[in-house]
Image: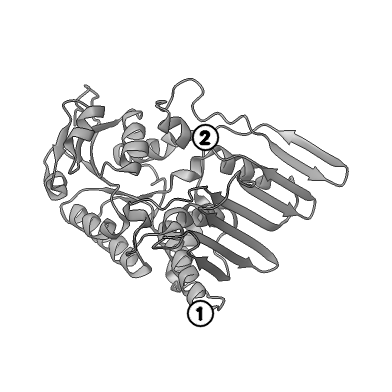
Amino acid sequence: MTGIDGQADAVRVGLIGYGFSGRTFHAPLIRSVAGLELRAVSSRDAGKVHADFPGMTVHADPRALITAADIDLVVIATPNATHAPLARAAIAAGKPVVIDKPFTLDLDEARDLLALANRHGRLLSVFHNRRWDSDFRTVRAAIDAGLVGTVTQFDSHFDRFRPDVRDRWRERSGPGSGVWYDLGPHLVDQALLLFGLPEGVQASIATQRPGAMTDDWAHVVLSYGQRRVILQASMLVAGGVDRFTVHGTAGSMTKRCADRQEAQLLAGMRPGDAGWGEDPDPLVIHDGNGHREQPAIPGDQRQYYRGIAAALRESAKNPVEPIAALAVMAVVEAAILSAKTGATVPLALTDPERNAAVRALSSATVQI
């Protein structure tokens, strides 16, 4: 394989979808990673693609991109309800696949895709890019170092202040829309990396904004014995709250501000530019004698696509194994059921799925 910029053995990437996620995250990150070459995009708006990448091949039909002979990897960054059918088509065409989160709409779709990828011997990965955020990396390192002892309560917030309902698929009524499908997978994936699979899920999900057509508030509690992990997402939080609050047997810690990579990308910064991923907001650690500050660890979401390139070119480990993403979907689904019934819901995983997910989560690394 030789990429269009002359990279020998470059993996030629086809990106399906050039909306917010495809344009803001996937395209810049793919183009910043040695060994990957963005060769084509599937979009109904060729003008938008060409405004960013003059001369880029644009397919109006995603199936034309999937079957193109010069595409080695298919990246799916489309509305959530289309993830599974497009991934099935790509795997059937013999292509490895990256799917933006959420993996699928439900657990059954996730199982079908994982089984299909295994039958065809094709890489299947899910873009859980927030594993490589500065805020999460900083808190994870502090927990691993035992700075607050045994964690008893972990609060993780992904809040916005967007009081006006916008006309976009994420905010319309339909399968896979709403804040829990949008931000919940990030919150869940990080929690599973830290603490493994919960014993039960209890959730409240609501629609709060005037005119909203789908959920815009979610409060989900994961139970781990005496430990509680609290996941919160809202579209009506002005000024924000701490991104992370962690309490433990030896103290507490707070991380006020979120990772800056999304804001940097929206401002036009290219991954790898000076200051990329740097986080000036420190971790604050409290104990009975006061508090101290610890610098934040930089974030770098390029590591996801570096991992994909290594997996395809060098047979390295998949940076996000599909069984781990399947476990995320089990929590997402359990929360929806809990919100409907008011019950605490266990994960609907088989014993083999549970064991495989535990292995994948415990062996996952987040490196710079």
- The residue lying furthest to the front in this view is 210
Residue 8 appears anywhere in the view: yes
For the residue marked with disc 1, what is the amino acid? Thr
Residue 260 badge = 2
Q: Secondary structure at mark 2?
A: loop
Q: Are marks 2 and 1 in contact (CB under 8 Å)?
A: no
Question: Which disc is residue 33 wearing?
Answer: none
Colour scheme employed for the rendering of this structure: one colour
Determine which residue is flagged by label 1: 341
Q: Using the rendered view, name the quadrant where residue 120 is placed.
A: bottom left
Residues 219 and 199: in front is 219
Query: In the displayed structure, would residue 59 be above or below residue 158?
Result: above
In this image, 199 relative to 36: left or right?
right
281 vs 313, left or right, is right
2 or 1: tag closer to the N-terminus? 2
Q: Say what amino acid the circle numbered 2 marks.
A: Arg
Q: Residue 88 at x, y = what percent? A: 22, 58
Please state, as top left, top right, bottom left or bottom right, where the N terminus lies in the image: top left
